Amino acid sequence: MELQKWIDKGYEVIINFGPKILAAIAIWIIGSWIVKSLIKGLRKTMDKQDYDPSLKKFLLNLLGWILKIVLIIVVLGTVGVETTSFAAIIAAAGLAVGLALQGSLANFAGGVLLMIFKPIKVGDLIEAQGEVGVVKEIEIFTTKLTGLSNREIIIPNAALSNGNIINYTTEGTRRVDLVFGVGYDSDIKQTKDVFSQVLASHPKVLKEPAPTIAVSELADSSINFVVRPWCNAEDYWTVYFDVTEQTKEALDAAGIEIPYPHAVEIQKEG
């Protein structure tokens, strides 16, 4: 008699919940296939658009989890589980996590903007947030630079995306700005010729755009010249140091004085 009672309850459960369970299983199978197809199609689209690999992976994983959570809520609702409170709990948890990770979310948003609009890319020489370095890696929350002295510099993406960025690599060439002072007794034309010869003899100084050589200032003790050659971005420091050294040697060889402060010796009587 007891067994029959349990059998009757089993039939009742099957009759009442069987269709819902079958529907939930069908929704899960079909929904999982749809989610998988959407992710696969989006991945192909991102591949064609040449998205950053780290951004692509993160966005696909994030979208996959969101769609699966929505699918789980739909399945539970089909079975008969009250999902209103369940959704409210998820929303509250999301809000709490968002407030706790406000700074991290700002960095994430900055990383997404950097990866989508691509103002910089790996290998670029940039100046940002008071730092100069070559972009080593653009991550979701931070960007890593290799400084000129081989330091690793880590900049939060929120600050990087909201601040000024000077990209020295984008145009391919850079102008080297140098200033040299010579004595007032020096011949201006001869001095310009010396600068021109130094620049013309350096293999990494570009012919086009043509370098600028001009008097920039009549200072207290010197005539100051600006010397501005152009070079490929990766040759900047080579040209900077070489031209500085070679100009000093060429001025000395031409007998052109580079003024410097002279110590005045005061002889005391007695």
Image (cartoon, helix red, strand yellow):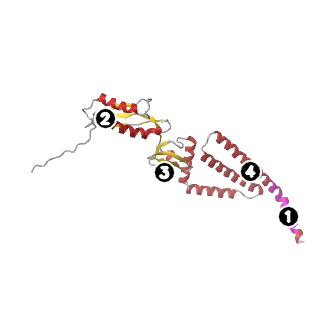
Does residue 186 belong to the magenta stretch? no
Dot in front, 1 or 4: 4
The image shows residue 232 at horizontal and vertical percentages of 47, 36
Quadrant placement of the N terminus: bottom right
The mark that comes first in sequence, 1 or 4, is 1
Give the camera-side residue of 110 and 140: 140
- Classed neighbour count for the residue bearing mark 4: other residues with Cα under 10 Å, few (<14), some (14–19), many (≥20): some
Horizontal arrangement in the rendering, residue 197 relative to residue 135 (left or right): left
Dot in front, 2 or 4: 2
Spatial CA distance of label 1 from label 4 is 30 Å
Q: Mark 4 and mark 2 in contact (Cβ < 8 Å)?
A: no
Residue at the spot x=71%, y=57% of the render?
83
Identity of the amino acid at label 4?
Ser
- Which label is found at residue 152? 3
Q: Mark 1 and mark 2 in contact (Cβ < 8 Å)?
A: no
Question: In this figure, which residue is indicated by the disc labeled 4?
Answer: 32
The mark that comes first in sequence, 2 or 4, is 4
Spatial CA distance of label 3 from label 4 is 43 Å
Question: In this figure, which residue is indicated by the disc labeled 2?
Answer: 251
The mark that comes first in sequence, 3 or 2, is 3
Dot in front, 3 or 2: 2
The image shows residue 190 at horizontal and vertical percentages of 30, 29
Spatial CA distance of label 2 from label 1 is 104 Å
Dot in front, 3 or 4: 3
Q: Mark 4 and mark 3 in contact (Cβ < 8 Å)?
A: no
- Which label is found at residue 10? 1
- Classed neighbour count for the residue bearing mark 3: other residues with Cα under 10 Å, few (<14), some (14–19), many (≥20): some
Identity of the amino acid at label 1?
Gly
